[in-house]
Amino acid sequence: MKTRSIESEDIQQLNSTFADLYEKNVKDAILETGQIMEIPEGEILIDIGQYIKMMPLLLSGSLKILREDNDGKELLLYHVHPGETCAMSITCCMGDAKSSVRAVAEEDTKLIALPTRIMDEWSNQYPSWKHFIMRTYQRRFEELLNTIDSIAFQKLDDRLERWLKEKTAKSPDGVIQITHQEIASELHSSREVISRLLKKMEHQGTLELGRNKIKMR
DNA sequence: ACATTAATTGTGT
DNA sequence: ACACAATTAATGT
């Protein structure tokens, strides 16, 4: 992981990605206190039990936020995308508690790291910062509700189908590069179940399976 | 090219 | 859910 100070090209990116932080003061404050971090894919940004030192403003790439199960299994909580910050980091720095989650870079990721202590001060000083924090919470909460009722009320094969459709839409050639285990984690299911559902779909001819890849038709 | 090993996927209980 | 078999990809020699 590399750390450096903020340069002019970053400021461009900050403006376009975080358009809601419109106050000049906020931007100045960010430029003054922030550090650019560049994290290669797969690197752990924060692990469980560590103290949170900073809150991230994502410029590019994405993060996975994971919780660890009683017996060491990983459970995906949510993703953090450009223009967002991590809701857990907000919670943690209010009580300066240890992190109960792990944050991993899903792809090569660039972000601005802000020291946690600024949270309070800025919320009082800058309305647009306060709104930004509020919206972060609100969105996370909505997503949480969606997750809950998809788990409670939707059948797994429907969820898998929808998930596949979304992924296919994002990849140009209609081929998804992923393992069954990873899909299972995303959908909060088990690897075997996903394997079997995929197999069924392959027999129906809706897709073609290969190692680490799924081709849709 | 071949053997070894690790990772991923398949299947029965 | 677990245990194990089968298959495939990666790596070393």
Image (tube, coloured by chain):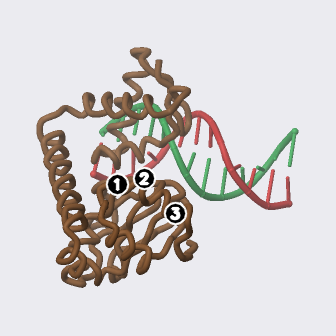
Chain colours: A brown, B green, C red
- Tell me the subunit letter for badge 2: A
Across and down, in percent, residue A117 comes to 28, 84
Is the residue at mark 1 from the same chain as the one at mark 2? yes
Under mark 2, the amino acid is Ser
Dot 2: element: helix
Under mark 1, the amino acid is Ala
Residue contact at pointers 1 and 2, CB within 8 angstroms: yes
Q: Is residue A173 above or below residue A60?
A: above
Write down the residue under mark 3: A10
Local packing at callout 1 (Cα closer than 10 Å; few below 14, some 14-19, many 20+) is few
Local packing at callout 2 (Cα closer than 10 Å; few below 14, some 14-19, many 20+) is few
Write down the residue under mark 2: A16
Q: Which residue is at 43% across, 63% downward? A: A104
Q: Which residue is at 42% across, 57% downward? A: A15
Relative horizontal placement of residue B3, taking residue A186 as reference (left or right)? right
Is the residue at mark 3 from the same chain as the one at mark 2? yes
Across and down, in percent, residue A71 comes to 30, 66
Calculate the distance from the C-alpha at mark 3 to the C-alpha at mark 2: 10 Å
Under mark 3, the amino acid is Asp
Nearer to me, A198 or A85: A85
Relative horizontal placement of residue A108, taking residue A128 as reference (left or right)? right
Write down the residue under mark 1: A19
Please report whichever mark, 1 or 3, sits nearer to the chain's N-terminal start: 3
